[in-house]
Amino acid sequence: MKDVIGTQKSNLAKQESHWETTLSSKPDMFGEQQSASASIAADVFKKEGVSDILELGGGQGRDTMFFAKNGFQVQVIDYSSSGVVDIKEKAEIRGLSQLITAKCHDIRNPLPFENDSFDACYSHMLYCMALTTGELEFLSKEIRRVLKPGGLNIYTVRHTGDADFAIGTHHGEDMYQAGGFIVHFFSEDKVRHLAEGYKIVEIDEFEEGLLPRKLFRVTLKKE
């Protein structure tokens, strides 16, 4: 068991380096247009009167910029220093610096915010990075801690119906590597397991990209 845990930690360290290299060498790797999930999340946030958003794994900031343009105050964290620098530069160029705060952080560690700090949390495919279920349980509890009572957590993950599931090198649990990145695929049972302490508002299936990727969009409310 110790060997398995050690291997997983080693894999995670390699993934961090790979993300850093990829983001620094490919400006706007995911494009400048916001994700469809961010558009849907923004509509939900507006209806719920959200003003402060914590975005996890902001990447190069395409969704961050979109939220700020729509008037939300955004605190975004990412473990890639290149991504954080990119977000700060884009925010300054677009005149959005007053609405966006970006910092480096490893979400396997406690979130660097006080209890009850945010109206909502948003992440697009952050949960399906090379994170173990135990680490995801910890993250889910940390998000709940920093959300205000009744706060929303909206996240997306690739699910086990995706064409890439069980393809390539297996890295334990439901994690597979078919290219440079390890992907943690989710069953609905895992989504429900990680929802402890929340009310499940919606688990919606959707598709994205050319494959296409098959994902869940999960909307939770802090109880």
Image: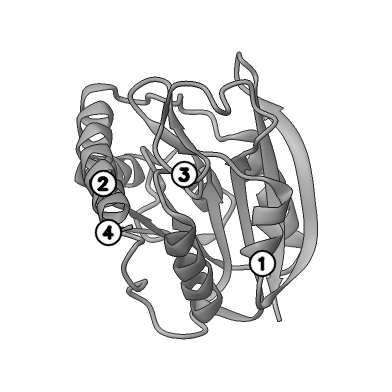
Q: CA distance from mark 3 to mark 4?
A: 42 Å
Contact between marks 2 and 1 (CB within 8 A): the answer is no
Single out the residue that lies furthest toward the front.
1
Q: CA distance from mark 2 to mark 1?
A: 27 Å
**Label 2's element?**
helix
Residue 48 vertical placement versus 145 (above, below): above
Residue indicated by mark 1 = 195
Q: CA distance from mark 2 to mark 4?
A: 9 Å
Q: Which mark is residue 7?
A: 2
In the rendering, at what x and y percent does residue 214 appear? Answer: 67, 29
In the rendering, at what x and y percent does residue 163 appear? Answer: 63, 21
**Label 4's element?**
helix
Q: Of the residues under marks 2 and 1, which one precedes in the sequence?
A: 2
The crowd level at tag 3 (other Cα within 10 Å; few <14, some 14-19, many 20+) is: many
Q: CA distance from mark 3 to mark 1?
A: 28 Å
Left or right: 66, with 44 as reference point: left
The crowd level at tag 2 (other Cα within 10 Å; few <14, some 14-19, many 20+) is: some
Front tag of 2 and 4? 4
Residue indicated by mark 4 = 2
Asked whether residue 138 appears in the rendered view, the answer is yes
Residue drawn at (43%, 43%), measured in percent from left and top? 172
